[in-house]
Image (cartoon, rainbow, N blue to C red):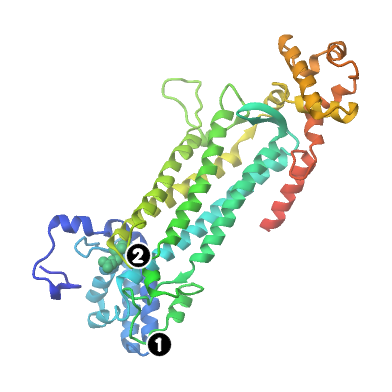
Amino acid sequence: TSNQMWGGRFAAGPDAIMEAINASIGFDQRMAAQDIAGSRAHAAMLAATGIVSDKDAEAMREGLLTVLSEIEGGTFVFSTTLEDIHMNVEARLKDIIGEPAGRLHTGRSRNDQVATDFKLWVRDQFDAFESGLLALIKALLAQAEVGADWVMPGFTHLQTAQPVTWGHHMMAYVEMFGRDLSRTRDARKRMNECPLGAAALAGTSFPIDRDMTAKVLGFDRPSANSLDAVSDRDFALEFLSTASICAMHLSRMAEELVIWSSAQFRFVVLSDRFSTGSSIMPQKKNPDAAELIRAKIGRIFGANVALMTVMKGLPLAYSKDMQEDKEQVFDAADNLMLALAAMEGMVKDMSANRPSLEAAAGSGFSTATDLADWLVRVLGMPFRDAHHVTGTLVAMAEQNECDLPDLTLEQMQSVHSDITSDIYEVLGVHNSVASRVSYGGTAPSQVLAQVARWKEMLE
Ligand code: ARG
């Protein structure tokens, strides 16, 4: 049998394979609530502009609410023959209210309808993204505040570089997720234009009121070009690209947690609630949540590349290729929200192993730069010479299998005779971090100032 929506032109129905490749109802039913919200706004506008009667609009409103409750109640029967959520809803509306249902699609197309539904869906995800980030940032701030003066090694090339503070390291992630937050807010603002009323591609001859529907649906304004309105998936791509950058941050942090929780590092203890055991090795406590965050990020990057690739060669305006946008975004959004929540849970629960951090902070000649700086500051040596003298002392310590503060004054003076015992002060890790008071530096005073700044901003 031919299609009930466009059967007029068709003598035969679709092949089963055609139906299978064409149908999106299997996934776009996730936009049911958005579809019905869009239709309700459209119906109200059609009545307000006199395009349909108030009576018909009222029937549509009632009917759409019934459809919504059927979907929410799980009694709605989705049909593949009806292709997508838009036609499933409309067909059911027709069953319920009869003739007026056929007037709902006046001045509208599935092209502007799907763009509107999807935008509403993605907009909600930007909001969820924002809340997830805020919760994670708060958990990091709490860690930073308690450990503002706990020393730990800072690394470059994953080799001990200079001592830093736990708080400083946590605040580095706050900055990263803070930029993600600003990106989501920025993108959400930019996407908030309503495609509804662009119709198929050219607009419509009916006297519709696009400002009204835009406002009812919480958009800032209607989109200004009907061709662009139905062709645009930038909002989905911006969601995926901001999600990708955030995912990259999550993955770096997950990687650090995996390393830090190992027996070799012992920098953090993850809670039982966010760890798993081994079925064979009784001693094991594995950082699976961190590993899964690190891994799930691949899907988010993948979705971003997939949708970019779908969109890149499409002529204006709508092409059916664009139906491939949803599954990518759905999957990326689900996994992003899960990863954010899991990271928040891990960060909230984890405890830094302070003695272990402190012991590691002092090893690996981490205060060599402080020593060189002392030679510059106290002896007036050019930094390059100080670097060389310090290097000689490091080699000496290495040969003696000790750390820099373990060298005797005589040993130090054998490298440079002007060195005095004052030098030992700068070789301690606490003095080292306390001295780094430059703006944004690792000194506890700086860290606490940044914590305070963030707390104020989040209020
Ligand atoms: N299911 C379609 C999609 O997701 C809805 C739009 C269909 N428009 C069309 N001209 N066939 O993109």
> Is ligand 1 within 8 Å of the beta carbon of the residue shown at mark 1?
no
The local secondary structure at tag 1 comes to helix
- What residue did someone put label 2 on? 32
For image coordinates 36% across by 62% down, the residue present is: 31
Is residue 34 something one can see in this rendering?
no
**In-front residue for pair 38/353:** 38
> What quarter of the picture does the N terminus occupy?
bottom left
For image coordinates 50% across by 45% down, the residue present is: 247
Location of residue 433 with respect to 124 vertically, above or below: above
Distance between the Cα atoms at labels 1 and 2? 24 Å
Image location of residue 78, percent across then percent down: 25, 62
Image location of residue 119, percent across then percent down: 42, 65
Q: Residues within 10 Å of mark 1 (few under 14, many from 20)?
A: some
Is residue 351 something one can see in this rendering?
yes
Location of residue 355 with respect to 255 vertically, above or below: above
Image location of residue 73, percent across then percent down: 33, 63
> Is ligand 1 within 8 Å of the beta carbon of the residue shown at mark 2?
no
Q: Determine whether, in the image, residue 100 is placed left or right of residue 180.
A: left
Q: Amino acid at mark 2?
A: Ala
**In-front residue for pair 41/162:** 162
- What residue did someone put label 1 on? 48
Q: Residues within 10 Å of mark 2 (few under 14, many from 20)?
A: many
For image coordinates 34% across by 54% down, the residue present is: 310
**In-front residue for pair 240/271:** 240
> What quarter of the picture does the C terminus occupy?
bottom right
Q: Quadrant of ligand 1?
A: bottom left
